[in-house]
Image (cartoon, rainbow, N blue to C red):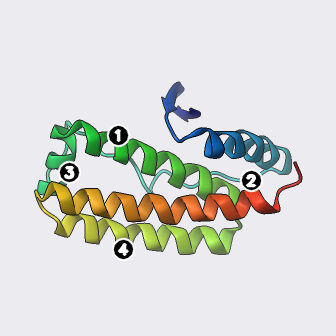
Amino acid sequence: MAVRKTSGATAFVVLGWKHATAILILAGAGLAVGAQPAAAADYAPIDCAKASLPSEQTICRNYGLGQSEARMATLFGIVTSLVAMGQRGDIGEAQRQWLKTRNQCGTDVACITDAYKARIQTLSTVMDSIASHGPF
């Protein structure tokens, strides 16, 4: 379980113990060196009250997809807060491209699920790389 701050509230998202441990250690290290979090404009989780695209509406109606959205958004926020500016820009651009791909799925739950699996795997790989270099 990992912790994420959202609008002053604390949200708990299940990421798995391996990532949660790395996140807590890395988040503490990032705070110590003054890492800047990604800007909110880089990626904001879906607001189901404002969901307008078919893919967003499908995610909001499907518990499993909603959980994947929360996990991916948490990983994205943590990863972008821990990498250097240049890599942060690359990850943000990849996120924008991924959103286009996810949105092309429309209401196809299997397609959206596969899109989330791929993005979560990519972000998890970045997280693993960060964790392998840390001083802990």
Q: In the image, residue 90 lies at what x, y percent?
A: 55, 75
- Mark 1 against mark 4, which lies toward the viewer? 1
Give left or right: position of 102 versus 22.
left
Kind of residue indicated by mark 4: Gln
Kind of residue indicated by mark 3: Glu
Who comes first in sequence, dot 3 or dot 1?
3
Q: Secondary structure at mark 1?
A: helix
Give me the disc on residue 67. 1
| Residue at image mark 2 | 35
| Residue at image mark 3 | 56
Q: Secondary structure at mark 3?
A: helix
Kind of residue indicated by mark 1: Gln
Are the two marked residues, 1 and 2, in contact with CB atoms closer than 8 angstroms? no
Q: Is residue 12 above or below residue 64?
A: above
Who comes first in sequence, dot 4 or dot 3?
3
Q: Residue furthest top?
A: 9
Residue in the picture at 61% in, 64% down? 126
| Residue at image mark 4 | 97
Residue in the picture at 50% in, 45% down? 74
Mark 1, other Cα within 10 Å: few <14 / some 14–19 / many ≥20: some
Who comes first in sequence, dot 1 or dot 2?
2
Quarter in which the N terminus is drawn: top right
Q: CA distance from mark 1 to mark 4?
A: 21 Å
Q: CA distance from mark 2 to mark 3?
A: 31 Å
Are the two marked residues, 4 and 3, in contact with CB atoms closer than 8 angstroms? no
Q: Secondary structure at mark 4?
A: helix
- On the question of residue 130 being in view, the answer is yes
Q: CA distance from mark 4 to mark 3?
A: 16 Å
